Image (tube, helix red, strand yellow):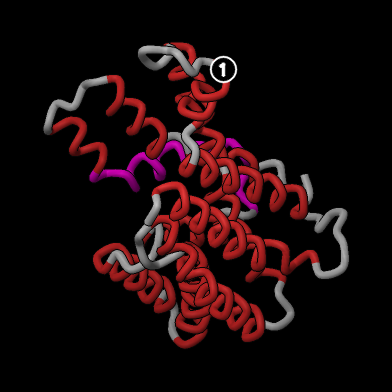
Amino acid sequence: MSFFTLKIIALLSMLWDHLTYVWPLTMTLELLFFPDAAETVPALLVLQRVTDYLGRIAAPIFLFSIANGYRHTRNFKRYALRLMVFACLAEYPYYLLFHFHGNIMFTLLLGLLTLRLMDWGNEKRDKLGYALAAGVVIAAQCLSLTEGNGAYILFILVFYWTEQWPVRKKTLLWLLLIPLSRYKLVWMFLSEGLFTYRWFHMLCINALGPLLGVAFTFFYNGRKGSAFPGDKYLWYVFYPAHLLILGLVQKAILGM
């Protein structure tokens, strides 16, 4: 699977996730096909729960793309600057749609800078870079300034470190790492006895769902793949543009 194919899969997954955030699938299908239903059709709830996983494919692929991009970029400064510019452009649309600050492009930028910091530190002193990278991960997790916090920075580092690992070994690592990264949710689920279907689904979506995206990266064949002029800007432009459109639509629907 080429890098271009992975990016398209991630874009479609992200679009699905955000579309169903504005128009939940159950609500949309009920309005179209069951307008007179007194309560939610059970089959639609099942469909909603299953398709929720489609939206969890995107983030791991985008995180993988930073590790891969850092390894192959010809101009690190230009790469970082591009991420910073579009992260700033995406911040208002992100807040408009989700009412939170710190969109994922800032996370990707921080991950990219962490990779560079790690390599710089290791050049200065043996294993210093690893300590610096760990510091960034811990600080990002504690400050919670960007989407995914320190866990997403750690994922970028892991994608970078494990490029040459066999798939079986990488699978075992990610099966452990992603659930551990959701330790707060797991602890809340167990300590507060939230043993309901709704909470169990939320736990699975967040602690296991991203494994789908990780699995797609295992099929990367190291090739750029079919592309078109300016294709590298597709993600950069698409991200703030679709957030802005969906944010404005949501605002119109809610009459805000």
Please name the residue shown 47% across and 87% down the image.
Answer: 124
User: Which image quarter: residue 12?
Assistant: top right
**Residue 17 visible here:** yes
- Indicate left or right for 185 with 254 as reference: left
In this view, the residue in front, 139 or 169, is 139
Q: Secondary structure at mark 1?
A: helix
Crowding at dot 1, Cα within 10 Å, few <14 / some 14-19 / many 20+, comes out as few
Image coordinates of residue 145 in percent, x first then y, are: 33, 68
Q: Is residue 216 above or below residue 35?
A: below
Viewer can see residue 169: no
- Dot 1 amino acid type: Phe
The location of residue 17, given as percent across then percent down, is 52, 42
Residue 95: quadrant of the picture: bottom left
Q: Residue furthest left?
A: 192
Please provide percent x and percent y for residue 125: 43, 84
Q: Is residue 9 left or right of residue 181?
A: right
Screen quadrant of the N terminus: top right
User: What residue is pinned by disc 1?
Assistant: 33
In the rendered image, residue 122 lying in the magenta stretch gets the answer: no
Is 171 in the magenta? yes
Q: Is residue 12 above or below residue 119?
A: above
Q: Which residues are magenta?
A: 164-184
Q: Is residue 176 above or below residue 48?
A: below
Main SS of the magenta part reads: helix
Between residue 191 and residue 87, name the one nearer to us: 87
Residue drawn at 21 percent across, 32 percent down = 189
- Horizontal side of 173 relative to 214 (left or right) equals left
